[in-house]
Image (cartoon, helix red, strand yellow):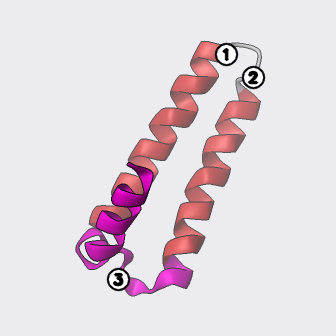
Amino acid sequence: MRITWFAWLAQHADEYGYSDGPLRATIGTGAVLVTAALFWFALHRNRPAAMAAAGLTCALGVGWLAFH
């Protein structure tokens, strides 16, 4: 299933804003993941809030990168 997902994503990469090149896509995705990790560490005492904040940050960040 994962291989199929990555194959589909690679086939449609130009439709999701990653057409600026793999380096820019990697930098943007890495920045989103670092931001999500910062939210996680900032809220680590309240695990449900940390998970929600990190998940929402990832979803919104990658979604924004994909469609802008």
Alpha carbon separation for disc pair 1 and 3:
36 Å
Residue 23 is situated, as x and y percent measured from the top left of the image, at 56, 83
Alpha carbon separation for disc pair 2 and 1:
6 Å
Q: Are marks 3 and 2 in contact (CB under 8 Å)?
A: no
Residue placed under numbered mark 3 in the picture: 19
Q: Is residue 34 left or right of residue 4?
A: right
Alpha carbon separation for disc pair 3 and 2:
35 Å
Q: Residue at x 46, y 35 (%)?
A: 56
Three-letter amino acid code at disc 3? Ser
Which SS class for mark 2?
loop
Residue 46 vertical position relative to residue 21 in the rendered view, above or below: above
Three-letter amino acid code at disc 1? Arg
Three-letter amino acid code at disc 2? His
Which label was assigned to residue 44?
A: 2
Q: Which residues are magenta?
A: 1-24
Give whichever of discs 3 and 2 has the lower sequence position: 3
Which label was assigned to residue 47?
A: 1
